[in-house]
Image (cartoon, rainbow, N blue to C red):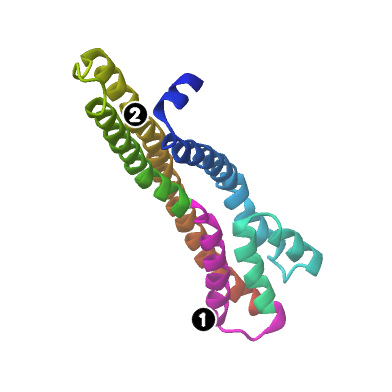
Amino acid sequence: MFSIIQAAGWPIWPLLLCSVLALALVIERALALRTAKVAPPKLLDEAIAVSARGLPPPDVIRQLEQNSALGEVLAAGFKALVERPNSSEDDLRAATEGAGRIAAHRLERYLGALGTIASAAPLLGLLGTVIGMIEIFGSQSAGASGGANPAQLAQGISIALYNTAFGLVVAIPSLICWRYFRGRVDAHLMALELAAERFVRHLVYVRRLP
């Protein structure tokens, strides 16, 4: 591998940097977009159960907020009702939607960078190939008067194509991971939206309790 990197020349170094960065982003997003970290399945039911007879104490709300992205959305509804006991349904919905937008921004973090790497890696590989071909033909034309050596020319072209191959090796997994994470984010956002709507209706009920 090291000999291939040496043979491909300096244009392959940006691709190596992209590959390391893409791997780091994939690992980070895989950990950050886990269901347990974004929207635990039983959290909504637990929040509704703990507030069935009234608002929970502040420490419970704080613990809920630190639980997950869904916990932040639910805690925002609790806080709105604590601060303004006479909040309307629209006020409660606005509070949860605001927290949801913040959570959505955090879920989508780094996906743009991963998509950029997936788009730019093939172009970087093509650039390296073009530069290599220019150097190869330049050295052949300036070579010995006996003419170009076909074997040397073929070897030089194969070396130049390493950049294109490596660019595709970086781009294809990055694109697959980007599409996968994009789908995960959309699914999580839908789950947050549905949970927030159900929770707002519950808060309206809690607000009416004596």
Whether 4 is drawn above or below 9: the answer is above
Gap between marks 1 and 2, in whole Å?
55 Å
Q: Let me know if residue 209 appears in the view.
A: no
Is 198 contained in the magenta span? no
What is the span of residues highlighted in magenta in the rendered image? Answer: 82-110
Whether 43 is drawn above or below 180: the answer is below
Residue position for label 1: 90
Q: Residue at x 41, y 35 (%)?
A: 170
Residue position for label 2: 165
Q: Quadrant of the C terminus?
A: bottom right
Judging depth in this view, the residue of 55 and 34 nearest the camera is 34
Judging depth in this view, the residue of 18 and 49 nearest the camera is 18
Q: Residue at x 31, y 27 (%)?
A: 161
Whether 116 is drawn above or below 104: the answer is above
Residue 71 location (% of width, % of height): 64, 59
Residue 195 location (% of width, % of height): 53, 60
Q: Nearer the viewer, mark 1 or mark 2?
A: 2
Q: Let me know if residue 16 appears in the view.
A: yes
Residue 119 location (% of width, % of height): 35, 46
Residue found farthest to the front: 145
Disc 2 secondary structure class: helix
Residue 150 placement: quadrant: top left
Count of marks placed on residues? 2
Identify the amino acid type marked 2. Answer: Ala
Residue 125 placement: quadrant: top left
Residue 154 placement: quadrant: top left
Disc 1 secondary structure class: helix
From the viewer's perspective, is 106 left or right of 129?
A: right
Judging depth in this view, the residue of 161 and 45 nearest the camera is 161
Judging depth in this view, the residue of 122 and 74 nearest the camera is 122
Crowding around mark 2 (Cα neighbors within 10 Å: few <14, some 14 to 19, many 20+) is some
Identify the amino acid type marked 1. Answer: Asp
